């Protein structure tokens, strides 16, 4: 089956760890897409949407910890955007449990939201963090900011 989205170099924040996490999120969205299009069992769809939900929460927690560490001035707005994404996944999971199906609209929303978030909001914090640290690595930037090294 065809995927709904593929990684492109334009999505890179030049932070290998975060880019890898974003690739996993895109892969999970593709897995859910293929499950819906392929009409796999409801149990498998539930498993995949829960996997997406858990990974999203983990990724957002790591990202938000980093943003706090670098004292990102748009932290509150960024966190609010994450909450909207998580709420949409939770709503669709509830719909799946209640009605036995996920909507293709939801999958398009997730894909579009994630790509727009990476290209807009995430690129902004990546540029901001470059000015605060000298490392291109997420972990390097995190520890540089944490230790106060500029």
Image: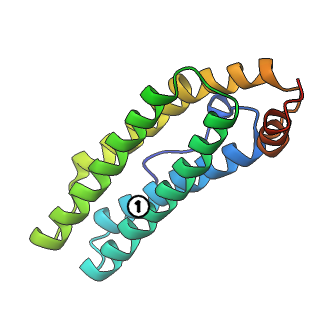
Percent position (x, y) of residue 67?
Answer: 62, 34
Quarter that holds the C terminus: top right
Residue at the left extreme, as displayed = 99
Q: Is residue 70 above or below residue 138?
A: above
Q: How many numbered dots are placed on residues in this image?
A: 1
Name the foreground residue: 33 vs 76: 76
Residue at the (46%, 53%) spot, across then down: 3
Q: Residue 117: x, y in percent?
A: 48, 31
Task: Give the x, y percent position of residue 2.
Answer: 45, 55
Element type at mark 1:
helix
Q: Residues within 10 Å of mark 1 (few under 14, many from 20)?
A: many
Task: Find residue 1 and report its image quarter.
Answer: bottom left
The image quadrant that residue 18 belongs to is top right
Q: Is residue 2 visible?
A: no
For residue 86, side relative to residue 67 (left or right): left
Tag 1 residue? 53
Q: Nearer the viewer, residue 114 or 134?
A: 134
């Amino acid at each position: 089956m065809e995927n709904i989205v593929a990684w492109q170099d334009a999505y890179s924040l030049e932070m290998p760890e975060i880019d890898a996490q974003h690739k996993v999120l895109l892969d999970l969205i593709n897995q859910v897409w293929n499950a819906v299009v392929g009409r796999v069992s409801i149990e498998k769809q539930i498993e995949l949407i829960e996997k997406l939900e858990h990974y999203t929460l983990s990724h957002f927690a790591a990202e938000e910890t980093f943003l706090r560490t670098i004292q990102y001035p748009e932290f509150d707005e960024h966190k609010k955007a994450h909450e909207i994404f998580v709420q949409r996944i939770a709503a669709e999971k509830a719909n799946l449990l209640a009605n036995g199906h996920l909507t293709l609209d939801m999958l398009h929303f997730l894909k579009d939201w994630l790509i727009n978030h990476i290209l807009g909001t995430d690129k902004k914090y990546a540029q901001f963090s470059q000015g605060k640290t000298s490392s291109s690595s997420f972990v390097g930037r995190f520890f540089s900011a944490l230790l106060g090294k500029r």
